[in-house]
Image (cartoon, rainbow, N blue to C red):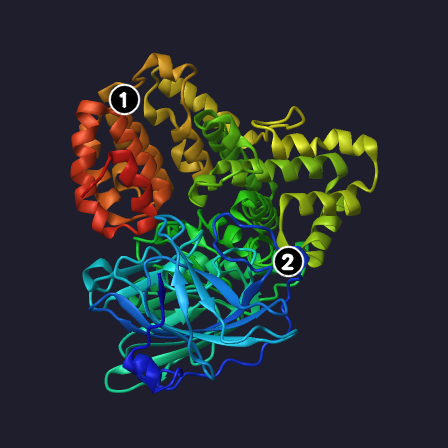
Amino acid sequence: MSRVLLTACALAALSLAACAGGPVAEPPAMSAPVARPVDYVRDVHSHARPEVARVVDVALDLAADFEASRLSGTATLSITGVPGAQEIILDVLNLDLQAVGGPQAGALAYTLGAEDPTLGQALTVRLDRPLAAGETRRLVIVYATRPDAAALQWLTPAQTAGGRLPYLFSQGQAILTRTWVPTQDSPGIRQTFSARITAPEALKVVMSADHLTPEGEPAGPGRRSWRFRMDNPVPPYLIAIGAGDVAFEAIDDRTGVFTEPSKLAAAHRELVPTAGMVAAAEALYGPYIWGRYDLLVLPPSFPFGGMENPRLTFATPTIIAGDQSLVSLVAHELAHSWSGNLVTNATWDDFWLNEGFTVYFENRIMEAVYGRDRALQEQVLGWNSLQDTLASLPPADTRLKLDLAGRDPDDGMTDVAYEKGAAFLRTIERLVGRERFDVWLRGYFERNAFRPMTTERFLEDIRAHLVQGDAALESRLMMDAWIYQPGMPSNWVPPVSDAFAPVDAAAQAVFVAGAPVSTVPWGEWNTQQRLRFLGWRPEGLEAAGDWLSPAQLADLSATLGLTAEGNAEIVFAWLQIALQHRYDPAVPQAEGFLTGMGRRKFVLPLFRTLWAEADWGRPLATRLYREARPLYHPVTTGSVDPLLGWEG
């Protein structure tokens, strides 16, 4: 369908001042694109053809309507392309388009392709004249998001800690940015961006960019606007926004915490190690190039543990344990400032290049800050999680390099990318030595900064700069087997932590020999050891069925204080045991946990456990999900709905 549609607002002038409540800031002149044509890789999860014409900058001017749950206004795209290009193809999903044009060209013809529930539609814009060599053209799109935009979650005041004001946040990874920004939504098409966001004056707006107006500026009765700019080109999934009752407290001169005022003191205490982590990361692999590193601790419906949005990591409140025991998540998101934000997978088939490198880097930060033993414990926990994942996936999905054509890219976001990827890098480190490996990895980040990476380019880099023609080393590394073959290659050595030996002995005594839980030195263990204990399972568990009696479960809960536990990771581990055993006394705790946060890491496995308990668990799962689902972000409901066959 081809349309040329201009609203009265658009016809006034394609600057569209009236649409968003004020004048639109003129985007700065664009420099030449960072990426070269040779860098482009066909992305099956995007309609874009960047080898013909690509977006290099996005300038947003949007107004937030919390009553309608909509953002509306304009996106001004700066585009460039090959000489003679006459069209550009963008990605959109469930956007209400009102007009497409150019500041000088007026209305432009555009077509919307066939709808795909995952990929959305191709928005093809016909240019008024062909692109000239070296030209950067501006394209203005007038649009509004829909209330069900998958990247955006609009929370009522009752869904926040303060209970006074509404809240909005975005989650763009993997391909959800197209539900609120009409652009080329592929990780290999890096873009700078700026924004002017208008919202009710009682709210504070933050974004993953330099905050040009930290206190906002007047924008009419009862409204304020906030301006932002990101000068480093980023993949579109890192364009992020938050708006609500938000306060800030600095940790040091370049790190700090945003969150709701009533949660700020606790979040700040918990996240004080952030400053030391930034210093440790820089000492390992070079300067942090993004300016500030702040965190936004979101309301509990945030679907992930964290999201590495540049300058402003989004984090779940479930990491606020009260004892800084879960701050490895901060190390992980910080590490993404190099592996993911600086060097980014070109397509989602190469997702391991983001997450495998980041898990490795995260563990090195933890070792630098907390010591080798703590880092080893977390390696072992990750290894155990990976074994469960490998056993649950089809062989093709246990390769690092995936083929996700025709699938949602979220299908590749498993422990294979994270933990197998990290295990691969640790294997290389072990075989070449840490000092030599660190020289290569630091150089890898420098050589490939702002370049979309593929597995094949990774192999070219490591062979050129580390292997350097050493056939014997190439053979020992088994790189092709790690990347292209399922499972774990034969040269992997599982991590071992001596700190877990007494934990395993205590678990054997309690769970197999029937010793009382009072014999467990719970108070002497750290969080990682406690998670090891609760994650321990007898050999042949699948054949053995239930392995704890109701009396043992009651002893476990009462003696270890699990009902009153505030550490979300420990609560999750305990509930997995309790629900597997159909332990009725744990149901109220499960209900409170599942209706009190929306982190997919916890929500999906617990509903999966309930669903497996047929006559006992399925009615309970259905009742809890009906209550909890309105809290959850679309990322979480998109995973749980199919499991439960949910149709509303």
**Picture layout, residue 613 above or below residue 462:** above
Within 10 angstroms of label 1, few (less than 14), some, or many (20 or more) residues? some
The location of residue 181, given as percent across then percent down, is: 40, 65
Q: Is residue 324 visible?
A: yes
Q: Which of marks 1 and 2 is nearer the N terminus?
A: 2
Label 1 SS = helix
Residue position for label 1? 552
Instruction: Judge by depth and name the residue closer to the eye, 60 or 315.
Output: 60
Residue 350's place in the image compared with 541, above or below, is below
Instruction: State whether residue 300 is above or below residue 578.
Output: below
Q: What is the quadrant of residue 558 in the picture?
A: top left
Image quadrant occupied by the N terminus? bottom left
Q: In which quarter of the image is residue 158?
A: bottom left
Neighbours of disc 2 within 10 Å: few (<14), some (14-19), many (20+): many
Nearest the camera: 52 or 241?
52
User: In which quadrant of the rendered view does residue 285 lie?
Assistant: bottom right
Please give left or right for residue 313 compared with residue 17 in the image.
right
Q: What residue type is labelled 2?
A: Arg
> Number of callouts in the render?
2
Q: Name the residue under label 2.
A: 451
- Left or right of 526 on screen, residue 554: left
443 or 531, which is in the foreground? Answer: 443
Q: What residue type is labelled 1?
A: Gln
Q: What x and y, as percent, mark residue 155?
A: 25, 61
- State the residue at coordinates (55%, 54%): 336
Left-right relation of 448 to 122: right
Across and down, in percent, residue 173 comes to 44, 53
Residue under the image location 64 percent in, 58 percent down: 451
Image location of residue 391, percent across then percent down: 46, 25
